[in-house]
Amino acid sequence: MSPVNHYVYMLRCKDNTLYTGYTTDPKRRLSMHETGKGARYTKGRGPFVLEHLECYGTKGEAMSREHAIKALTRRQKEALIKAGKMTEMRDQG
């Protein structure tokens, strides 16, 4: 059995707002958001762009990071996106 990865992601909604969330399957979760079944906040705000993705070995680490990102200002979130830390998803194709 392969280890489960835990991801924290940021989506840019069509209204240019940012949504931060946690998942173990980024592609499935994005699909859920697109079909209106992801989160109450994102319902009706699609289409979405996956702007940022980070991978962690444990759920606890990922949840802590999600909380930290949610506490950032908009400017800080944009800087995080600009820093281009989305290597994990690109590597997985």
Image: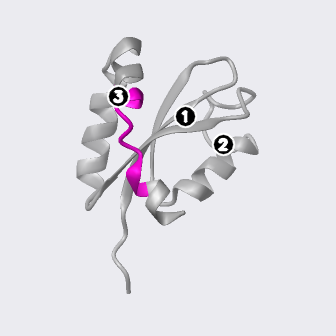
On residue 50, the disc is none
Q: Which residues are magenta?
A: 80-88
> Spatial distance from mark 2 to mark 3, Cα to Cα?
22 Å
Residue beneath the point at 39% across and 51% down: 87
Identity, as a three-letter code, of the amino acid under mark 2: His
Location of the C terminus (image quadrant): bottom right
On residue 33, the disc is 2
First in sequence, mark 1 or 3: give its number: 1
Describe the element under mark 1 as helix, strand or loop: strand
Which residue in the rendered view is the most extreme toward the bottom?
1
Q: Is residue 4 above or below residue 20?
A: below
User: Answer yes or no: do the residues labelled 2 and 1 have beta carbons within 8 Å?
Assistant: yes
Describe the element under mark 2 as helix, strand or loop: helix
Query: In the rendered image, which residue does mark 3 sit on?
Result: 80
Residue beneath the point at 26% across and 59% down: 58
First in sequence, mark 2 or 1: give its number: 1
Residue beneath the point at 73% across and 34% down: 47
Q: Is residue 70 above or below residue 6?
A: above
Query: In the rendered image, which residue does mark 1 sit on?
Result: 11
The quarter of the displayed image where residue 27 is located: bottom right
Q: Is residue 53 left or right of residue 11?
A: left
Figure coloring: one colour
